[in-house]
Image (tube, rainbow, N blue to C red):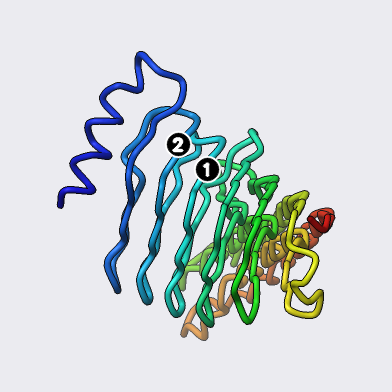
Amino acid sequence: MRKLRLLAVACSAAIFTPVVMAEAVVVEAHSLLRLPVKTSVLQLDRLEVSDYGTLLIPAGVDEVRVGELVLGHEARIAIIPSGQGFNMVVGRGELASGSQITARGAPGTFLKPALPGRNLTLRLENLNADELSIDARGGSGAPGYFGLDGANGEDPGCLWGEASRGFNGDNGSNGHDGAPGALVRLELPAAFPAEHIKVLVNGGVGGLAGAAGLAGKGGASKGCLVYRADGGKSGRPGQPGQPGAPGRDGSLTVQRL
């Protein structure tokens, strides 16, 4: 609790200083913590995310400097999407198996387009890890709208009238495009093996095509004692939309220290 209080005091001073400094941030196992800061730059002596824990870094934070970074088994640092790139400088990193840093873009919705992966520069001056895993893929596109089904035609009466034709189904709309992957730059110790670097910068997948609306059925004929009317023709089904285009792939640059 002492460490979290130190962080809160530092955050309250963010209005007066451009860099917030704190001793440590610790995320307990199997828990989620969002950095409670409102400044763009944060400096920590130690950042620890325990096994299966997740640390969320808000979109407004552009840079984090850490003396010692410890990620437990299946731990996550999730960097929220933003148009501003994110820089992280680590003096010494200890990364357990299954740990990951994510800077993925957000998937699109019917109201908002997909967001690209957040551009990331990560400097690890010393690193002890079996694998460095980063996911900076673009967000997937939203699916297209389904076409509305056509209404059915009216049935004829038994004394007069004729059956009406069914209405045509509407066309489905096109899926939305996926967002680009991020531009990732890694600055790593020369001894860290290249085959242990796992970085995903793929563009987001395009949204599924909207399905076509079904044809409305024509009015049904009736066998009446006095009057018999023919049935109405069915309408035409709509056309399905087109799938959205995949987002552009990002890039990875590795510089050895």
Q: In this view, does 104 lie to the left or right of 191?
A: left
Q: In this view, does 155 lie to the left or right of 86?
A: left
Instruction: Tell me what residue is drawn at x 23 percent, y 36 percent.
Output: 8
Q: Nearer the viewer, residue 38 or 138?
A: 38
Instruction: Tell me what residue is drawn at x 74 percent, y 66 percent.
Output: 236
Q: Mark 1–mark 2 contact, CB under 8 Å?
A: yes
Residue 229 % position (x, y): 60, 74
Instruction: Tell me what residue is drawn at x 41 percent, y 47 percent.
Output: 45
Against 203, is 109 above or below? Answer: above
In the picture, the disc for residue 74 is: none
For the question of whether residue 226 can be seen, the reply is yes
Q: Nearer the viewer, residue 232 or 118?
A: 118
Snapshot quadrant of residue 58: top left
Q: What element carries label 1?
A: strand
Instruction: Tell me what residue is drawn at x 57 percent, y 71 percent.
Output: 219
At label 2, which amino acid type do we have? Leu
Against 89, is 63 above or below? Answer: above
Q: Residues within 10 Å of mark 1 (few under 14, many from 20)?
A: many
- The alpha-carbon separation of the residues under discs 1 and 2 comes to 6 Å
Q: Is mark 2 on a helix, strand or loop?
A: strand
> So how many labels did they put on this image?
2
Residue 196 % position (x, y): 73, 78
The residue to which callout 2 is attached is 42
For the question of whether residue 230 can be seen, the reply is no
Q: How crowded is mark 2: few (under 14 residues within 10 Å), some or many (20 or more)?
A: many
In the picture, the disc for residue 65 is: 1
Q: Is residue 236 left or right of residue 42?
A: right
At label 1, which amino acid type do we have? Arg
Which residue extends farthest left? 1
Residue 153 % position (x, y): 57, 64
